[in-house]
Amino acid sequence: MENWSLPETKTKPLYQEIMLLIEEKIRSGQLAAGERLPAERKLAEALDVNRSTVIRAMEELTAQGVLTRKKGSGTFVNPDKWGLQMRPMINWGTALTTAHLKRTSPYQQAAERMKVQFPETVLDLSNGSLRSDLLPELHAPSLSWKELVEQEKAQLAVAHGIKSLRESVQRHLKRTYQIDVPLEEILITSGTQNALFLITQGLLKPGDTIGIEAPSYFYSLRLFQAAGLRIVPIKMDREGMTIKGLQEASLNHSLKMVFLNPIFQNPTGLVMSAKRKAEILDYCLLKRIPIVEDDAYGGLAFDEDMDYLPLKQLDTAQQVIYLGTMSKLAGHHLRVGWMVGPQAVLKELADIRLQIDSEVSFLPQFMADAFLRNELEDHLQFVRVELAKRARAMEDWLREQFGDTIAFEPARGGFHLYCRFPGRSKEEVEQLLMALLDQQIIVSEGEKFGDLTNGFRLSFIHFKLPH
């Protein structure tokens, strides 16, 4: 065993010195993701310490998610991000899992090359943004620059966003979801990720544990890692996040918050049942676990008679912070969203935003206000019809291509369809995806969302029949 030695001058307890040594080897690349560590006895001999000291160090790192232990096989560097407690570091580029977060699979590398080589002909079903032909004709306000400045002065009296836009959001929530919200409980943001950033900075601290659905787009967000949060996966079934999974997560970890995307969930497209929504709220209230609900796709139901009401609609105890966004309705160029939650919490987050100088610009707010007031209903109807057509066309194409070997739940709304090949191995599915890539068709691997099986996501918003 080479290069296993502790510093001559020890400033910490031995088990912590061993933890730091292992972490440094992972950071420097001497220990790769998934690599097996030396046996406890051999490592104890090399370091000239008791075996119990080595065991304690490994148990601590396992509890943090840095290592994984397999009975009868040994201890390994965690190959995956699930459960990994990240630590913010000033030394940029050497954080514990920087290499893992930047790692791209051979498929992803090939897909990126395809986008560069064939930008005009590639069918990118991994793209989760609205196509240009589904964007509304946003109208710039017919005001001079001086008039806009005067409008801004008149409306930016509070840090929560301009009053007229919050009033439009208030009407939208009432009309679409039957949610009555006071203006003081609405905070305008520059999109969902801005809202999530404020939450991680204002309501959580490094080392806190959060629960998210598995799989989930939350898994791919680096802002959780940047905030030093530990991510715990919670299983889903056809009705959404399972109560059993939530119970197990809360018993094994001190969950500080749960993040949900219950309506047309990204990437699976699943819709949480009414019964499950009530159960989730009841359990989290019992355990005093706050919920952050991302409702990016709720207004995009193909059948308006289905239950697409958010958790927030059932929230009578102020336990849910609700996030909405314009990007799925009007395109990502209009970066405006809203956060709905307890007044005191929103005031704290608004104050934090002022301190970091990330106030939402006035002009996007002004345009979003005009869109919500004058164009939203007609545009939503148009987009729903078009998305449903593309979803059905893509489902038909998948069945023609793969027959009964492919499994998916028909889309009921939103942007995404999640597929699996139950009878095939992960390696076989990788070959199938490469074959699609040969046809210039790109999808999103499930690994991006924390799915370690053979799932993959297709965004039907960009679907057109291949030539």
Image (cartoon, grey):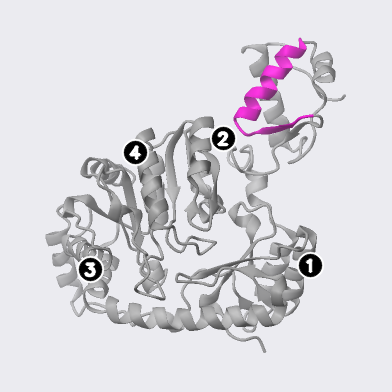
Q: Regarding mark 1 in the picture, which secondary structure is present there?
A: helix
The magenta-colored residue range is 50-71
Is 43 on the left or on the right of 443, as rendered?
right
Q: Which residue is mark 4?
A: 285
Real-space Cα separation, disc 2 to disc 1, in angstroms: 33 Å
Question: Marks 1 and 4: CB-CB under 8 Å?
Answer: no
Residue type, numbered disc 3: Arg
- In this view, which residue lies farthest toward the bottom? 467
Which is nearer the eye, 388 or 450?
Answer: 388
Q: Regarding mark 3 in the picture, which secondary structure is present there?
A: helix
Which is nearer the eye, 248 or 220?
Answer: 248
Answer with the quarter of the image where residue 34 lies: top right
Q: How many marks?
A: 4
Question: Marks 2 and 4: CB-CB under 8 Å?
Answer: no
State which quarter of the image contains the C terminus: bottom right
Across and down, in percent, residue 255 comes to 46, 35
Which is nearer the eye, 314 or 6?
Answer: 314
Across and down, in percent, residue 379 comes to 33, 80
Real-space Cα separation, disc 1 to disc 3, in angstroms: 47 Å
- For marks 2 and 1, the one nearer the N-term is 2
Within-10-Å neighbours for mark 1: few <14, some 14–19, many 20+: few
Q: What's the residue at 24%, 44% (across, down)?
A: 342
Which is nearer the eye, 89 or 35?
Answer: 35
Q: Which residue is mark 2?
A: 85
Within-10-Å neighbours for mark 3: few <14, some 14–19, many 20+: few
State which quarter of the image contains the N terminus: top right
Answer with the quarter of the image where residue 374 lies: bottom left
Real-space Cα separation, disc 1 to disc 4, in angstroms: 45 Å
Residue 56 lies in the magenta-colored region: yes
Residue 175 bears which disc, if any?
3
Residue type, numbered disc 4: Leu
Within-10-Å neighbours for mark 4: few <14, some 14–19, many 20+: some
